[in-house]
Image (cartoon, helix red, strand yellow):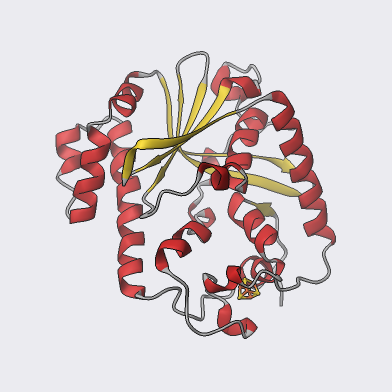
Amino acid sequence: MPIELTTLSQSSLQDYNDCPRRFELRYLQHLAYPAIETEPALENEKHQREGEHFHRLVQQYFIGIPAEQVSKQANTDNLQRWWGHFIISKDLAVLRDLPGLKTEMTLSAPLGAYRLIAKYDLIASDGGKFFIYDWKTYRKRPKSEWLAIRWQTRVYRALLVQAGAHLNGGIPIQPEQVEMVYWFSEFPNDPARFTYQSDQFKRDRDALLRFAEDIKSASNYPKTDDTTKCLYCPYRSYCNRGARAGDALDTELESEAEELFDLNFEQIGEIEF
Ligand code: SF4
């Protein structure tokens, strides 16, 4: 029995975009993953856990815990390497001195019949601009063109404009004040940066509303025609789209852990639009 959906996130929008059937299985039927996502599964799982751990280390650093203390928790080879890359980055070190730092912050705003919700790794402001930082522990540096069209890049910037006025003394944030930065722990000198413009914001807002209407009125959820999406999909066995998984490096780009269930709704800042 499908459960009524009340929120949308970059992950659910991306799933609906990539394959409505996957959206249905994950967000309406709440089906647990029936298949091992990739081979070798254990290695992949370990990498995912380390990625979550790395996010916690960075969060501790930005809330003011001394770097020496945080570094003691980097207790695997990967974590030590990522943390080493992070801590020598001059660009990131200066962020800690900025007054307007928000870590692991959730923003939300109404979107048609839903609430659009996003959890940010870090929002930093120098008083004029607002920088959205997202930490990625990918083993492969994705192309910037690929990131530019992801729903995450569009949703995170649009939602900060829409629902971030309380971070700006009550004054709405203008799109031109926003920049999103993906920082890659394996590629510390090659972050992907995306500025924002008013026409992009308008385009994103319109597209989000249209997408929300589509989702609301959907009565069936077809499987994607693009069977390459199935290679990385944990629901393959439900769809007769092959038992063997695709390559783990590609999988981590295609499917990211949904963190909505961890959201603390008291942290949510919201304005109507
Ligand atoms: S296996 Fe393919 S068709 Fe089935 S949910 Fe996944 S992406 Fe969609």
Q: Position of residue 72 (x, y in %)?
A: 14, 45
Q: Quadrant of the N terminus?
A: bottom right
Write down the quadrant of residue 45 in the picture: bottom left
Q: Quadrant of the C terminus?
A: top right
Q: Is residue 30 visible?
A: no
Q: Is residue 41 above or below residue 88?
A: below
**Left-right relation of 97 to 19:** left
**Left-right relation of 152 to 259:** right
Write down the quadrant of residue 60 in the picture: top left
Residue depicted at 67% across the width and 69% down the height: 226
Q: Is residue 216 above or below residue 122?
A: below
**Left-right relation of 247 to 212:** left
Q: Is residue 17 visible?
A: yes
Q: Quadrant of ligand 1?
A: bottom right
Q: Is residue 90 above or below residue 38?
A: above
Total marks drawn? 0
For the view shown, which residue lies furthest in the top direction?
A: 127
Question: Which of 250 and 63 lies nearest the eye of the viewer?
Answer: 250
Q: Position of residue 97 (x, y in %)?
A: 32, 19
Q: Position of residue 36 (x, y in %)?
A: 44, 78
Question: Which of 115 and 241 lies nearest the eye of the viewer?
Answer: 241
Residue depicted at 54% across the width and 54% down the height: 260
Q: Position of residue 78 (x, y in %)?
A: 23, 54
Residue depicted at 53% across the width and 28% down the height: 179
